[in-house]
Amino acid sequence: MPPRRVARRVARELPAAMKSSMGLSSTAAEDALVSSLLRRLSHRVVQFVGDSTLRNQFVQLARVGLEIPRTLPLAMAVTQHNFSGAFSSSSPIKQSDRPDSSNGYWGGFGSMLATTPANATIAYAKIWGCTELTSTLLAARKAMNRHQRRTGHGRWPPDVIVWNFGLHLLHMYPARPVPTVSLRCALGYGELVHSSLHELQRAAPTARLMWRTTNAVCDSGFVGDWYDVIHAYSGSRSASYQLPAARRVRERCTRRYNVSEAVCDRTVMSRQNTLAQQRLALKALSDDPGVGVLDAFALTDGQCTSTADGRHYPNLLARINTNLLQELARAA
């Protein structure tokens, strides 16, 4: 059987695919721990800024904090008002049948906010690229102000901002292109993290800042066209690297971005490059001891049985949030 078909079969057998309700990706005991830690954030505001990995983290926290039934997808819970507390989003949720796993649907929301019955407010603001931080923070502030006017909860600046740039700077060309500017940001990743820190300090001078390292990529979790791309960058000593199809993948990348093959290799979405992001970020932040770190790379690295797509880890979200909430409790 050709390798590509084998990869697809393995992906179907993995138990880690995100269910229609993210509540089914964690255990009741994990949720209970998250809930108890979340209650310690009473009257505090936590703002997430990032891509779908941080959005999923927000959704797991919001589901637990709003006491949404474990089997009920977020969209259905909101449209049926089957939750406790308050919820806001940048646009109305009109499709109640959308599963929590729908990146295509939830990616259309620029912001989401939730206030628990214990008055802990958590918010999410979407940023996929590396040049939109100023506008994203402005949008996050406006969303927080709307939520505060509507519900009486939340405030700007928040008490905590958790932020990340990462996966959306890395290409899987031609399976998933990214803008050329994203490759440039990936190549200057340390400076990107450093400059974003100073921008956040200007925009929210009283907030505690916490960097979230990028999820570790599980190369073996990619299927279909993504499988073809990752194996085109498998190292010059591997058999797949020398195949004509692999050479064509690399040649297409060099033509599309007008860069060398080495640059395409350094900016492809792989474990090696997410590890490089982790190291560069920690080095860039090392001079500012006041910045916290949520090391999602360390929590997801080697956990290939917990991902169905090589980059999202639904079964580990409760563990990641537990680490976050414990760190915030220690710093309170």
Image (tube, helix red, strand yellow):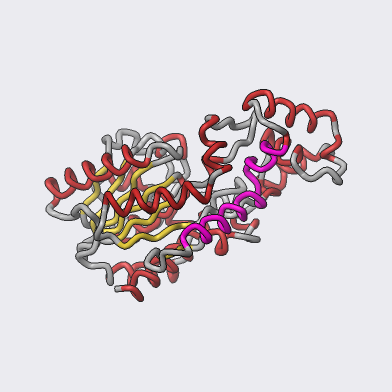
Give the residues in magenta. 262-285
What residue occupies the far top of the structure in this picture? 255
Q: 200 or 127, which lies in front? A: 200
| Residue lying at 30% horizontally and 37% vertically, measured from the top left | 93
**Residue at figure coordinates x 30%, y 33% from the top left:** 94
x, y percent for residue 111: 31, 42
Image quadrant assignment for residue 233: top right
Where 175 falls versus 70 (above or below)? above
- Magenta-drawn stretch contains 268: yes
Tell me if residue 79 can be seen.
Answer: no
- In the rendered view of the protein, which quadrant contains the C terminus? bottom left
**Residue in the foreground of this view, choosing between 109 and 266:** 266
Of residue 97 and residue 314, the one placed in the foreground of this image is 314
Q: What is the quadrant of residue 290 in the picture?
A: bottom left
Q: Looking at the rendering, in which quadrant would you find the N terminus?
A: top right
Please tell me whether residue 38 is drawn above or below residue 202 in the rendered image: below
Q: Is residue 105 above or below residue 161?
A: above
Image coordinates of residue 181 in percent, x first then y, are 51, 33
Q: Quadrant of residue 125?
A: top left
Most extreme residue toward the front is 287
Q: Residue at x 65, y 56 (%)?
A: 304
Q: Residue at x 71, y 41 (%)?
A: 230
Is 247 positioned to the left or the right of 178 in the image? right
Q: Is residue 276 magenta?
A: yes
* Magenta portion: prevailing SS class: helix
Residue 198 seen by the camera: yes
Farthest bottom residue? 330
